[in-house]
Image: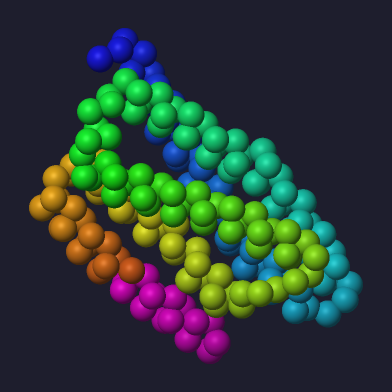
């Protein structure tokens, strides 16, 4: 193993954290932005302009660069540890990473729509969409940490339970908020 491996791995983990922080926060901004677009003037315009600035900066300065650096360091790690590419858990993990990249680009699309004043997802649907990145995070971490089929089964079982709990939590929050 290369002497650089631990440094690349540490960098990879740091960029994963910043990428996920950006993904978690951007969807919260979408929720607030969507709700702001339903307000009366002048609040609607004032809040919308502020959310547009925040969304663009978050995506362009933190989230997208972090994703790129995750991919670069991940490719470096796989180059050093190429035997992982023969493992089933790595194929599954890479599938979730591809799903996460698609999620990221969908967030960019939502940003562009909101900047045009186009709302395609309600704030309730955005709350559920926000939990999708958590699902990807849990799946990827379980796969990386456990690396075996039984661990994968337990991890995916835990993931299903997590999804159910998150959906129940969202519904309870909606009822609480409506009261």
- Residue 103 as seen in the image, left or right of residue 156: right
Eyeballing the image, is 45 above or below 85?
below
Find residue 137 and report its horizontal and vertical position in percent. Answer: 37, 51
Q: Is residue 25 visible?
A: yes
Eyeballing the image, is 46 above or below 90?
below
- Residue 34 as seen in the image, left or right of residue 85: right
- The residue closer to the viewer here, 179 or 107, is 107
Report the residue that reaches farthest toward the left.
150
Instruction: Tell me the residue at 29%/45% (across/down).
Output: 91
- Residue 68 as seen in the image, left or right of residue 135: right
Q: How is the image coloured?
A: rainbow
Asked where in the image residue 16 lies, by quadrant, the reply is top left
Asked where in the image residue 110 lies, by quadrant, the reply is bottom right
Instruction: Tell me the residue at 45%/40% (across/down).
Output: 17
Quadrant occupied by the N terminus: top left
In the image, which residues are magenta?
Answer: 164-179
Main secondary structure along the magenta-highlighted residues? helix
- Residue 52 as seen in the image, left or right of residue 156: right
């Amino acid at each position: 193993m290369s002497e650089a491996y631990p440094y690349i791995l540490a960098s990879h983990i740091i960029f994963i954290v910043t990428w996920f922080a950006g993904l978690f926060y951007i969807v919260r901004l979408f929720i607030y932005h969507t709700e702001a677009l339903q307000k009366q003037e002048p609040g609607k315009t004032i809040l919308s302009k502020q959310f547009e600035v925040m969304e663009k900066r978050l995506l362009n300065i933190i989230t997208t660069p972090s994703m790129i650096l995750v991919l670069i360091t991940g490719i470096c790690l796989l180059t050093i540890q190429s035997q992982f590419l023969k493992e089933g858990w790595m194929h599954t993990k890479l599938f979730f990473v591809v799903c996460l990249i698609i999620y990221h680009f969908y967030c960019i699309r939502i940003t562009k729509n909101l900047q045009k004043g186009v709302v395609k997802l309600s704030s309730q649907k955005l709350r559920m969409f926000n939990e999708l990145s958590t699902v990807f995070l849990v799946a990827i971490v379980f796969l990386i940490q456990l690396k075996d089929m039984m661990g994968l089964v337990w991890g995916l079982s835990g993931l299903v339970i997590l999804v159910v709990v998150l959906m129940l939590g969202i519904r309870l929050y909606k009822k609480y908020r409506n009261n």
